Every structure is written in C-alpha cells, then in structure tokens.
Image (spheres, helix red, strand yellow):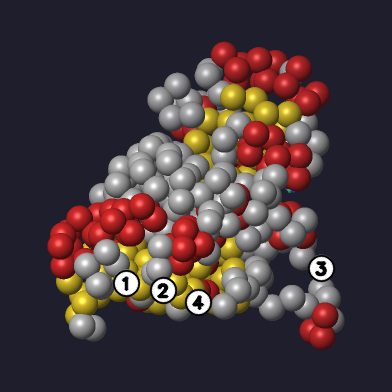
C-alpha cells in the first residue's frame, strides 16, 4: 500500500478534482504491475495496473489506495474491469465517500472477490484530504496555509522583508505544492509588500493554472502590482466588501480583468470562491490573514517551513491575533508529514485527524 500511495502522488496537479489514486497487482507476494491515475479524464489507477498485468492478473491481489469506483464517468466502472481481469482479492485503503462512485466493494463482493479496507487508511485519507473534504459536502474550499518562518515564527524582518527566509529547496517545494491547488491566496499587505506573482514555475505544470486570490477588504492595492497587471493571463480574484467595489479602485480592477468577489467575512468569501469552482485554496500569508483564518477555524492544513534563523520580537508574526487559551483546552493538530528541505524543515499538520 505504501508503494501504491507513492504512485498515487504522481497525479498531483494533473487529476483534480478527481482523487489521487495508485494501484499495484500482487501475485505470490511479488509486485507484477503498477498504475496510477495520471490525467483527469484518463485511465483510472486500477485500469492502468490491470492492463500492465494482462493475463497475470487472474487470481492476483489488487492493492489500491481508494475503493474501486462503480460508476460510468469519463472512464468505465473500475469494478467491471477488476471482475473481468479475474482478480481474487482487493485490498483498498479507504472507501470512496463520493455518492456517485460508491458501492464498488459491494459489487466486487457480489462477484465473489474478497475485499478488505483499512490498510494505511490514515495516510490515504491525508493524501486525498481536499477530495474527501468536497465529498463530505463541505460548502467552503479545503484551505491549507503555507508559511516560511524563522525559528521564532516570524514571516518577515522588522522592515517587512521576507525574501528569502527559506532556501531554494523550500521554494521548489512551494511551486510543486501550488500545482495541486485550485487557487492561491494572499492578504492585501503581502500583495502590496512582496508584489508576488503566485504562479507555478517548477517542473510540474498543473492541468489548470491556479487562480490567484487577494483578500483586501479595503481594496488597498496598487494597479501596477504584478497580480493585477497579469490578470488577463492568469485568472485573478480580489475579495473585498461590497461597498468597496463601488469605489474608483473597484472599477479600475474590473477594467484590468480582475474578478471581484464581494464578501463581508472570510466565511462568506470562501463560500463565494467555492461557488466559483475553487475546491482547494492554498493561502500563502501574511500573518494577519493566517491568524484571521485560524481564529475563524477555516484552516484544514498547515504547511510550515521552518528556517534556521531568528528574526526577533519586531519581526512580522506568522499567526497574528490568536487567542491565548489555557493549555488544557487547546486543540492539538496532527502531523502528517515531516522532512528536511535543504537546511529548512517542513512540517505538515492537519487540524482534524483522518480516521484509521
Ligand atoms: N514568510 C512567508 O511565508 C511570508 C508569506 C507572506 C507574507 N510574508 C510577509 O508578511 C508581511 C505581510 O503580512 P501581514 O501579516 O502584515 O499582512 P497580510 O496577512 O498579508 O495582509 C493583511 C491584510 O489582509 C487583509 N485581510 C483580508 N481579510 C482579513 C481578515 N479577515 N483579517 C485580517 N486581515 C484581512 C487586510 O487587507 P486590507 O489591507 O485591504 O485591509 C489586511 O490588511 C509582509 O512583510 C510579507 O513580506 C511572509
């Protein structure tokens, strides 16, 4: 299953809103074929692995990271292909909660195939957290925060400079990460100070370039900013209070090709983005927007890059305005990944723990 999960990850940036799925075919305890869902609309992982296995799939075990689907979509139902291939046993990490595709296990069992769930279920759920979030019927996008901080959790120095806290490996990681999200968001102050382009500039080209979203309630933006100037090439949204769009700046942004989304709160903003097709949002700071999202309990995942330096009390805090709760009542988040990125350290934390 660990191998199947690795394979599933190769679809990152290319398959959403479909899930990431990997599969292997085992005979006599040996891997005889592998496959993964590589492109939206293309063959599913099970079909890829079974076609690589050919006649050797007869009597074999199929290990797959998500329950095989039972519905006709852009591809035929996987369960029919599993049954036709003569597979004897299916080991799946988790069930498919999508009501349209569900029911695969029952169909397989009715055909006499052994079906087992639960192997590396937590890892499989973490891998597909945005997909599972949507399948649960949540009305807002899956929200992940990404911040690069000093050891003392500062995202910029006392002059508000943040380039570069983290090293080249961490920056490569961010370009890979962006490729798997529908939208990349920042607060108005970050748009003003850093003038970011928020595009994907790594070796992985996403199937659909993520939309850029600036949360700027007071519309305190510069028309010369990179995000605004390039709005006709890469879709760009500015979220602000409805009144703000009546001002001259609102009209100028619309004329520059920016999509204007009126919202009076972060909840309203996220719901409006979901209605416009944003199923997952990566927020890249700054600290005030990060703190506001955390206070409103609107963050599902944190990608925290910690760099080996200190910026002191006058540096810009990573998470502004969080309440100081007694230790006994604070919520603990759940680590889903820890690794080195050059001299920096990546920690990925989920707010809720996926089921085993
Ligand atoms: N190291 C990193 O990973 C990283 C990442 C990003 C930024 N940075 C640094 O962080 C600094 C900027 O961070 P910051 O904390 O000052 O500002 P910020 O979070 O980027 O922006 C704050 C602004 O976001 C807007 N906002 C929208 N909704 C909000 C809400 N509900 N609550 C609060 N604000 C909301 C407001 O815009 P209005 O101004 O329109 O009211 C507010 O002024 C810069 O120096 C930048 O270089 C570092």
Q: Name the residue under label 2.
A: 114
Please tell me which residue is depicted at 69% across the width and 35% down the height of the picture. Answer: 272
Q: Which quadrant is the C terminus positioned in?
A: bottom right
Q: Mark 4 points at which residue?
A: 118
Q: Which of 211 and 252 is in front in this view?
A: 211
Between tags 4 and 2, which lies in front? 2
Q: Position of residue 285 (x, y in %)?
A: 59, 53
> Do the numbered discs 2 and 1 sit on residues whose CB atoms are within 8 Å?
yes
Give left or right: position of 326 versus 88: right
Mark sitting on residue 37:
none
> Do the numbered discs 4 and 2 sit on residues whose CB atoms are within 8 Å?
no
> Do the numbered discs 4 and 3 sit on residues whose CB atoms are within 8 Å?
no
Q: Is mark 1 on a helix, strand or loop?
A: loop
| Label whose residue precedes the other's in the sequence (1 or 4) | 1
The crowding category of the residue bearing disc 4, from other C-alpha atoms within 10 Å (few below 14, some 14 to 19, many at least 20), is: some
The crowding category of the residue bearing disc 2, from other C-alpha atoms within 10 Å (few below 14, some 14 to 19, many at least 20), is: some
For ligand 1, tell me if the residue under mark 3 lies within 8 Å: no
Q: Which quadrant is the N terminus positioned in?
A: bottom left
| Label whose residue precedes the other's in the sequence (3 or 2) | 2
Q: Name the residue under label 1.
A: 88
Give left or right: position of 165 versus 323: left
| Label whose residue precedes the other's in the sequence (4 or 3) | 4
Between tags 3 and 2, which lies in front? 2
Mark sitting on residue 323:
3
Q: Is mark 4 on a helix, strand or loop?
A: loop
């Amino acid at each position: 299953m660990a191998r199947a999960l690795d394979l599933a990850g190769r679809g990152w940036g290319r398959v959403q809103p479909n899930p990431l799925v990997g599969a292997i075919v085992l005979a006599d305890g040996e891997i005889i074929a592998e496959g993964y869902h590589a492109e939206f609309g293309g063959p599913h992982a099970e079909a890829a692995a079974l076609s690589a296995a050919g006649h050797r799939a007869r009597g074999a075990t199929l290990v797959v990271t998500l329950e095989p689907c039972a519905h006709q979509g852009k591809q035929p139902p996987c369960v029919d292909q599993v049954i036709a291939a003569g597979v004897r046993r299916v080991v799946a990490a988790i069930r498919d909660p999508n009501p349209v595709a569900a029911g695969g296990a029952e169909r397989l069992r009715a055909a006499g195939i052994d079906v087992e769930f639960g192997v590396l279920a937590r890892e499989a759920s973490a891998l597909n957290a945005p997909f599972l979030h949507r399948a649960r019927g949540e009305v807002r996008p899956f929200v992940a925060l990404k911040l690069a901080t000093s050891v003392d959790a500062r995202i910029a120095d006392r002059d508000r400079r943040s380039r570069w806290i983290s090293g080249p490996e961490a920056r490569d990681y961010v370009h890979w990460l962006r490729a798997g999200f529908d939208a990349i968001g920042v607060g108005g102050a970050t748009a003003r100070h850093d003038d970011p382009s928020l595009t994907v500039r790594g070796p992985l080209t996403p199937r659909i370039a993520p939309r850029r979203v600036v949360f700027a309630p007071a519309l305190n933006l510069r028309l010369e900013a990179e995000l605004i100037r390039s709005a006709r090439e890469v879709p760009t949204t500015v979220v602000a209070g409805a009144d703000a769009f009546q001002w001259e700046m609102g009209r100028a942004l619309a004329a520059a090709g920016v999509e204007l989304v009126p919202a009076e709160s972060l909840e309203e903003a996220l719901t409006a983005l979901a209605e416009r097709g944003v199923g997952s949002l990566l927020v890249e700071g700054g600290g005030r927007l990060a703190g506001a999202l955390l206070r409103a309990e609107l963050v599902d995942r944190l990608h925290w890059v910690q760099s080996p330096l200190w910026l002191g009390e006058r540096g810009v805090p990573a998470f502004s305005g969080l309440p100081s709760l007694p230790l006994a009542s604070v919520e603990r988040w759940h680590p889903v990944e820890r690794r080195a990125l050059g001299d920096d350290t990546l920690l990925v934390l989920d707010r809720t723990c996926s089921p085993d």
